[in-house]
C-alpha cells in the first residue's frame, strides 16, 4: 500500500504543516474544509509538496524529520525537492 508525506502552506499565517496519509488529495480537502481541528484556523492551505512512500512507517519517519525543520529549512527543502511535488511552492 502507498502512503504520502506532504507539506501544506498557509499564506495568511505564513506557516507550514507537515503530515502523512494514504490519500493526499482527500487529506488536503479535509484540511481546507475545516475537518481537521489542528489546522482549521490556518485556512486556506496550499499543497506545496508531497512524495509517495512504500509504507506508513516510511511516511511517518519522513514526517518526523520534516517537523524538526525550521521555517527557512522547510522552504529550502521544498525548493530542493520540488521535482517530486504535485503543486506550486
Image: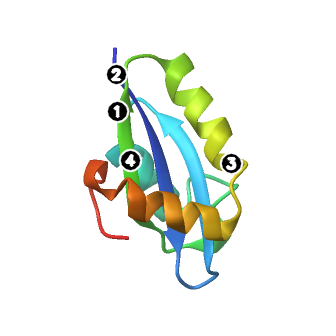
Residue 11 is situated, as x and y percent measured from the top left of the image, at 53, 82
Which residue is disc 2 drawn over?
A: 2
Q: Residues within 10 Å of mark 4 (few under 14, many from 20)?
A: many
SS at badge 4: strand
What residue is shown at x 66% (from left), y 68% (from top)?
Answer: 71
Query: Looking at the image, do the residues carrying marks 4 and 1 touch, with CB atoms under 8 Å apart?
Result: yes
Q: Does residue 26 appear to the left or right of 35 in the view shown?
A: left
The circle on residue 75 is none
Task: Report whether residue 33 is seen.
Answer: no
Residue 82 is situated, as x and y percent measured from the top left of the image, at 33, 58
Count of number-bearing discs: 4
The circle on residue 52 is 1
Precedes in sequence: disc 2 or disc 4? 2
SS at badge 2: loop
Residue 75 is situated, as x and y percent measured from the top left of the image, at 53, 68
Task: Report whether residue 86 is seen.
Answer: yes
Query: Could you give the CA–CA distance between mark 3 and mark 4, rounded to whole angstroms?
Result: 14 Å
Instruction: Tell which of 40 and 64 is nearer to you.
Output: 64
Instruction: Tell which of 30 and 53 is nearer to you.
Output: 53
Precedes in sequence: disc 3 or disc 1? 1
Query: Looking at the image, do the residues carrying marks 3 and 1 touch, with CB atoms under 8 Å apart?
Result: no
Q: How is the image coloured?
A: rainbow
SS at badge 1: strand
Instruction: Tell which of 33 and 50 is nearer to you.
Output: 50
Which residue is disc 3 drawn over?
A: 67
Query: Could you give the CA–CA distance between mark 3 and mark 2, rounded to whole angstroms?
Result: 21 Å
Precedes in sequence: disc 3 or disc 2? 2
SS at badge 3: helix
Which residue is disc 4 drawn over?
A: 50
Q: Residues within 10 Å of mark 2 (few under 14, many from 20)?
A: few
Q: Nearer the viewer, mark 3 or mark 2?
A: 3
Amino acid at each position: 500500500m502507498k502512503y504520502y508525506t506532504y507539506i501544506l502552506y498557509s499564506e495568511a499565517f505564513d506557516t507550514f504543516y507537515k503530515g502523512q496519509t494514504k490519500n493526499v488529495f482527500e487529506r488536503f480537502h479535509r484540511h481546507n474544509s475545516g475537518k481537521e481541528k489542528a489546522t482549521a484556523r490556518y485556512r486556506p492551505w496550499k499543497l506545496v509538496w508531497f512524495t509517495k512512500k512504500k509504507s506508513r512507517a516510511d511516511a511517518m519517519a519522513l514526517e518526523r524529520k520534516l517537523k524538526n525543520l525550521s521555517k527557512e529549512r522547510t522552504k529550502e527543502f521544498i525548493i530542493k525537492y520540488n521535482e517530486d511535488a504535485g503543486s506550486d511552492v
